[in-house]
Image (cartoon, rainbow, N blue to C red):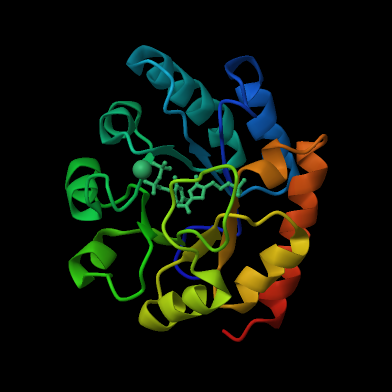
Amino acid sequence: MRGTLDVRLYVVTEPSLTPPPRLIESCLAAVRGGATLVQLRDKQATDDELLLRAAQLRDVLQPHGVPLVVNDRLDVARKVGIGVHVGVHDVAPVVAREVLGPAAVVGWSVEDPERMPPEQLAASSYLAASPVWVTPTKTDTAHPLGPPGVAAIRRATDLPLVGIGGINSPERAAEVIRAGADGVAVVSAVFGADDPQAAAARLRAAVDEALRGATP
Ligand SMILES: Cc1ncc(COP(=O)(O)OP(=O)(O)O)c(N)n1
Ligand SMILES: Cc1nc(C(=O)O)sc1CCOP(=O)(O)O
Ligand SMILES: [Mg+2]
């Protein structure tokens, strides 16, 4: 494992698949299946709703040792004492790091391996190759990097690295790991499954097996 953050199976919530009444139960199922990191991603919630959901999720994940990250919302991350994931069009990792402090998880999306300023890398806890493949879950993405793009990011940094976007099968998860990632970030492959725990377990097994075969 690179660093202390375990990114092997990163699950990202989505209100249409993890509606509020099922949010906690869905995330706990993913954790029972082997998820190592959870992101609360909800662009529809009001500020109060997001704060409440973030605090509740933080509390249920904490006994499992699974960190929680909120998408985009540095203000919520600071108030709830959790991490944040920022993309190319959000606040920069250096800003998030300054606000949240040295121990916080700060994730950053990389859409172009040529655009990774050293100061942003230094402020990031992990990187997300964004996207690896086209996905119906998020259509306003950059051009897909494919496994070669993941490999290019890997060559440029030792930070923990996940792929995201279109990782819809254990085979694709393994492909991303073989390209050099340390884990995979998924929405629909877990939260769109009939049995999220079983789906997470299958992905986690594929990731672990591919990691055993990966060169250190
Ligand atoms: C793990 C992870 N990777 C990428 C993203 C996408 O971030 P961004 O490009 O800022 O897009 P939105 O999620 O804000 O729509 C992510 N959220 N998580
Ligand atoms: C939240 C998100 N960010 C992306 C990016 O490319 O930055 S793709 C994405 C959604 C990924 O959904 P699924 O696992 O269902 O393909
Ligand atoms: Mg964002």
Q: Quadrant of the N terminus?
A: bottom right
Q: Is residue 92 above or below residue 53?
A: below
Judge from the rendering whether residue 72 lies leftward or rightward of residue 101; answer left or right.
Answer: right
Counting from the top left corner in percent of width and height, residue 188 is at 66, 42
111 and 64: which is toward the camera: 111
At x 57%, y 84%, the residue is 216
Q: Is residue 1 visible?
A: no
Query: For residue 182, what is the image quadrant?
Result: bottom right
Counting from the top left corner in percent of width and height, residue 110 is at 37, 62
Q: Is residue 96 above or below residue 118?
A: above
Judge from the rendering whether residue 155 lies leftward or rightward of residue 37; answer left or right.
Answer: left
186 and 124: which is toward the camera: 186
117 and 80: which is toward the camera: 117
Count the marks. Answer: 0
Counting from the top left corner in percent of width and height, residue 143 is at 45, 62
Counting from the top left corner in percent of width and height, residue 90 is at 27, 44
At x 42%, y 83%, the residue is 155
At x 34%, y 33%, the residue is 81
121 and 191: which is toward the camera: 191
Q: Is residue 157 visible?
A: yes
Q: Hey, which residue is sitting farthest bottom in the picture? A: 215
Judge from the rendering whether residue 111 lies leftward or rightward of residue 2; answer left or right.
Answer: left
At x 42%, y 28%, the residue is 43
